[in-house]
Image: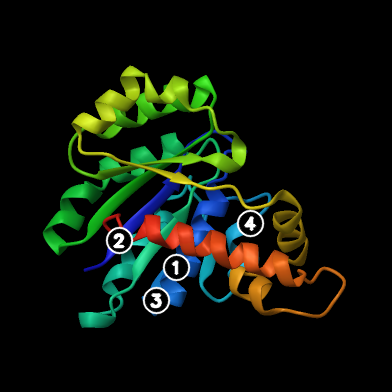
Amino acid sequence: MSSLNFIGGEKGGVGKSVVARVLAQYFIDNELPFTGFDTDRSHTTFTRFYQGYASPVIVDRFESLDAIAQALVDHTGETTPSIIVDLAAQTASPVARWIKESDLLTLMAEMGITVNLWHIADPGKDSVDLLDRLIETYGEGPNYIVVKNEGRGTDFSQLDHSEALQKALSKGAHVVSLGQLHESSMRKIDRQDTSFWAAVHQTSGPEALGLLERQRVKSWLKKSYETLRTLPL
């Protein structure tokens, strides 16, 4: 079974691209075929780190967004890939319009494809409000995956006690946490524009991680993968 994964959160700086990169690396390491799409025109973070797997898409053009669904039917049988869409900030409205006017959720259900709407959250109130808006927009139908990104903070009490989270849980939402990777290691990886696999295996060069830094990345990925295995991917 394939899955269509929209990695969102609407707010900038909550770690959407990091989650997209972790999910991409999970698919690669588990030999699960996938295609990636990057909606960020300014930074193209997903495309930079996973060249060959991700390509840009323009969210205010239906023809461009159609390529996301088309990628699922271009491959048949067991090799049908899953899709990862890294949603930039402020893209929720045009994407929602495309999904609704195309009746995408109905089509995906008919094709047996799981649709996952990921909400990447930091501890702030904005993330709570945006989760509420997400649930109000789509209601029943897709899977909701709420990710508490501990790389942006650890006190998620506002989210935990919010009506928005209760609404999400009533829709069967999955609520998980993504642990924090040591900040200096993440900065080095980002400066190299490399995948997490390359960061773990590259041992030479000015930005190469040290022995224990590579071990910490391995441990972080292992814990992240354990979390991902609990989700409908």
Q: Residue at x 35, y 38 (%)?
A: 97
Q: Earlier in the sequence, mark 2 or mark 4?
A: 4
Residue contact between numbered discs 3 and 1, judged by CB atoms under 8 Å: yes
Residue 46 percent across, percent down from the top left: 58, 60
Measure the alpha-carbon separation of dots 2 and 4: 24 Å
Which amino acid, mark 2?
Answer: Leu
Q: Residue at x 57, y 38 (%)?
A: 14
- Nearer to us of marks 3 and 2 is 3
Read off the residue under disc 4.
44
Measure the alpha-carbon separation of dots 3 and 2: 12 Å
Q: Is residue 185 left or right of residue 14?
A: right
Q: Earlier in the sequence, mark 3 or mark 2?
A: 3
Measure the alpha-carbon separation of dots 2 and 1: 10 Å
Q: Tell me, for residue 60, which label it has, or none.
A: none
Q: Residue at x 60, y 37 (%)?
A: 152
Q: Is residue 33 left or right of residue 80?
A: right
Q: Tell me, for residue 30, which label it has, or none.
A: 3
Read off the residue under disc 1.
26
Instruction: Give the secondary structure at mark 2.
Output: loop
Residue 65 visible somewhere in the drawing: yes
- Nearer to us of marks 4 and 1 is 1
Residue contact between numbered discs 2 and 1, judged by CB atoms under 8 Å: yes
Q: Earlier in the sequence, mark 3 or mark 4?
A: 3
Given residues 157 and 76, the one toward you in this image is 157
Q: Is residue 86 left or right of residue 48?
A: left
Residue contact between numbered discs 2 and 4, judged by CB atoms under 8 Å: no
Read off the residue under disc 2.
233
Residue contact between numbered discs 3 and 2, judged by CB atoms under 8 Å: no
Residue projecting furthest to the front: 212
Q: Which quadrant is the N terminus positioned in?
A: bottom left
Q: Residue at x 57, y 45 (%)?
A: 15
Q: Is residue 45 above or below residue 128?
A: below
